[in-house]
């Protein structure tokens, strides 16, 4: 298993965590990103498409999800929590970046580096 294979389509043997990349025993925690509401934000920063909606699979540990967010340059809204469905929010940064929020709180987002 020393070779990283980037294009895994199906892996029926073992599901690996998108955060720490260890094998997930049992049921993975699946996180989906909602469709982007405002697609006019520039694409082409570090990924060819701005957001992969998932589902992304993790251990049942928010730390794994936040590690994955950090690797992808997503920011995390600390007024929300890591949930199974996250809403991407375009951030007015340079270069453009995305924040992820569960979208449940009603006050302003507070995005912090994941
Ligand atoms: Zn993990
Ligand atoms: Zn928020």
Image (cartoon, rainbow, N blue to C red):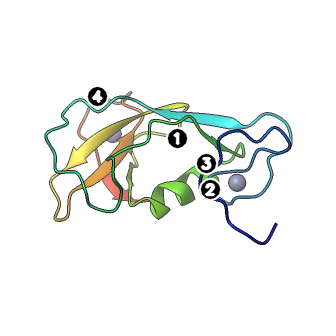
17 w.r.t. 3: above or below = above
Asked whether, in this view, residue 12 is left or right of residue 66, the answer is: right
Whichever of callouts 1 and 2 sits on the residue coming sooner in the sequence is 2
Q: CA distance from mark 1 to mark 3?
A: 6 Å
Residue 62 bears which disc, if any? Answer: 3
Tell me where residue 14 sits by quadrant: top right
Q: CA distance from mark 2 to mark 3?
A: 9 Å
Whichever of callouts 4 and 2 sits on the residue coming sooner in the sequence is 2
Q: Nearer the viewer, mark 4 or mark 2?
A: 2
- For label 1, the residue is 82
Tell me where residue 31 sits by quadrant: top right
Label 4: how many Cα within 10 Å (few below 14, some 14–19, many 20+)? few
Q: CA distance from mark 3 to mark 4?
A: 22 Å
- For label 4, the residue is 106
Whichever of callouts 1 and 3 sits on the residue coming sooner in the sequence is 3
Q: CA distance from mark 1 to mark 4?
A: 16 Å
Q: Position of residue 83 (x, y in %)?
A: 53, 34
Q: Nearer the viewer, residue 5 or 78?
A: 5
71 w.r.t. 51: above or below = below
């Amino acid at each position: 298993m020393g070779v990283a294979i980037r294009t895994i389509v199906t892996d029926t043997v073992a599901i690996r965590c998108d955060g720490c990349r260890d094998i997930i025993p049992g049921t993975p925690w699946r996180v989906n990103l909602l469709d982007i509401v405002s697609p006019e934000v520039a694409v082409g920063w570090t990924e060819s498409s701005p957001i992969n909606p998932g589902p992304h699979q993790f251990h049942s540990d928010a730390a794994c999800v936040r590690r994955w967010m950090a690797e992808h340059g997503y920011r995390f809204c600390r007024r929300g929590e890591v949930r199974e469905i996250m809403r991407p929010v375009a951030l007015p940064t340079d270069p453009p970046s995305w924040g992820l929020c569960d979208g449940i709180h009603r006050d302003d987002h507070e995005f912090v580096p994941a």
